[in-house]
Image (cartoon, rainbow, N blue to C red):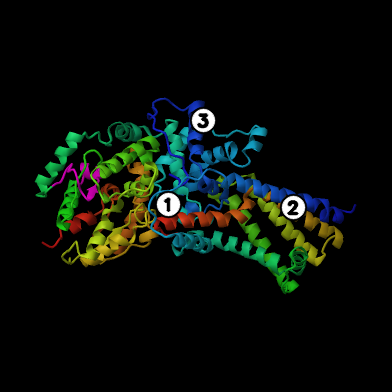
Amino acid sequence: MSPDAVPPQPKAPPSPANGPDAVQVTKAWHAFISDIGPTAALALESCVHCGRCAEACQYYVQTGDPRYTPIHKIEPFKQAYERRSGPFAFAYRLLGMAPKVTAEELETWQELIYDSCNMCGRCSLICPMGIDIASLVEQARHGMFDAGLVPPDYLGAIAEKEHASGSPFGLTIPQFHDLLHDIGRKHGVVMHVDEAKADIVPTLSSIDVKTYPASIAATAKLLNHMGASWTFRTDGFDADNVSLTAGDRAGQRKITLAIVQAAISCGAKIVLMPECGHSFTEMRWEAANSFGGELPFRVLQITELIAEGLTDGRIRVNKVTEAATYHDACQLSRRGGATAAPRVIMAALGLDLHEMEDAGDTNWCCGGGGGVALINRAQPLRDKAFQIKQRQVDATGMATVYTSCSGCRQTLEHGGKAANWNKTVASLLERVANNLKD
Amino acid sequence: MTLLAFARGPALQAAVLIMIAGICWRLAGIFLLRRRKRFALPRASVTGRIGGAFTTILTRFVPRRTFWPRIAVSVMLSGVFHIGLLIILLGGAPHIQVIHQVTGLTWPNLPKGLIVIVSGLTLASMIGLLIRRVLNPVLRLLSTVDDYLSWLLVFLPVLSGVLLSGETIGGYGTLLALHILSVELLMIWLPFGKLMHMLLVFAGRGAMGIDFARKGAAT
């Protein structure tokens, strides 16, 4: 969400079942325009059509299709702004020049706004005008959501379920409670769940719940090692926030505030975000806006907590004899400002890090960010985007790629499987947790 | 009234008025939008955020090294064009005289021959940029009437300036009038199209610099 955006009002998600009509197009415009503050307006007014953003976008670079030019992806919304609320909108009205895009065209734009943008923000780094295109795409998704134009499998299967239940997989509180204790028993880790008071409240990625439960055990093991007062809270655990990438502002807010309230109710000093990129962006930079004031706790991504713990001695690790490379999650590094933390961890582990080309702030996305991994029909495009990362990892000659985002981990694994790639993709958190000094 | 008198008199007054009013209107339309307070604890202090703004304003003149292989032609053409324009504007003796008349400020001019060479390079880079815009699929897709009109309204003053300096065709008075009129057309269009980026570029980069510094992210 743009820093200037107006807080959304809760409302039920629209049904994507019917095709778009004029009313839906109007809803799309309205949702987009209502988000625009000075920063977004400045961005929309500034584009000089130089086309450089295309050269930073993995979808354009890998396909050569000009439609994947980042700024082009928001063209209908840019028009809506210029002709309906921009400084010269009155002139467009006088001349009878309404936005040219029809409902059908907006429907076809779905692919550009969802399937072919991972909101990685690489285009924002190349733009000579300083336009944060990734934020504009996020705002365009608000419009698409309100118009019922989210890819059906995405909205129907995941975001809608999250909006209704608080979990993208529809996990109930009792189920979650049992799941945590099952993971604890299986991995031999003491779990703290729903304790009345705690200093640290860790949250989860539903990808971990579904695919990487060892990461949940690793979080618990690490916090126990630190001797921290901590607890999972079943009334606020899902950090994924699929609603954020779907464009469902009300759902986004609901998920976020559940975590905020859960943390406040147990007097938490830290809300700990899992190995997940977008959830960190949401909780670190947007949650306070949804809350309406400064949060009474710190928000740390797990790598930041580990880096702090290693620095101040609360975490002690054994040295490893291993060489590997590291994949930066865009939302943690380029978009989140946490580029250094994983490197502090790897240095403490003594890991022989072989950085990829463009490592750190100019890294390429795994190909699945921004919810693209959740859109089935986007797989061919996603796999093409993945090839960049594949080439870069191959160039390091390393057999293992560490990352600090379960979404990236899953995308890299899926992409690797499709390409018969013989690399191991691993969690940095798990590497630390399995290597703690007794 | 001669054409030159018209260009120096009512046309100039109208162009200045339209340009200033248009700029004010457009900037007000942007900056008077409601700004929402951001509550997240920033990584950077106020000083750090201001530093981020200035850093971004400066660093975006030269793209990051990793981007160069794919955008070198665009950067070079656009660089020659912008730097050329700046040299012509600030180094040409007649332009310095005009600035002196308006502001009282003055400085030594560059040799006329150098300005002519720079003008030629500027025109060549502009033609290169136009060819790219027409031939490159991405630029063709993005381009609107504004892009071509803005190009023309910058090209004409440079071209008429070169012709004027050599008094190649027509009389001096007519060429001067045409040169001034072409600049006035540019001034009139400036607030309404992409030429406004002359001002917005600094605000846009600065806003991004503040926002990214707040997050501790690289700009």
Along the horizontal axis of the image, is A276 left or right of B208?
left
Residue A199 is a magenta residue: yes
Residue A218, given in percent of the width and then of the height, sits at 17, 52
Residue B204, given in percent of the width and then of the height, sits at 54, 54
* Residue in the picture at 43% in, 54% down: A122
* Residue in the picture at 40% in, 48% down: B39
Mark 1 in CB contact with mark 3 (< 8 angstroms): no
Residues under labels 1 and 2: Cα distance? 39 Å
* Residue in the picture at 61% in, 46% down: B28
Of mark 1 and mark 3, the one earlier in the sequence is 3
Which quadrant holds residue B119?
bottom right
Q: Mark 3 lies on which chain?
A: A
Q: Name the residue under label 3.
A: A26
Q: Name the residue under label 2.
A: B16
The range drawn in magenta is: A191-212
Residue A327 or residue A280, whichever sits in front: A280
At numbered mark 2, what does the secondary structure look like: helix, strand or loop? helix
At numbered mark 1, what does the secondary structure look like: helix, strand or loop? loop
Along the horizontal axis of the image, is A19 left or right of A415?
right
Residues under labels 3 and 2: Cα distance? 38 Å
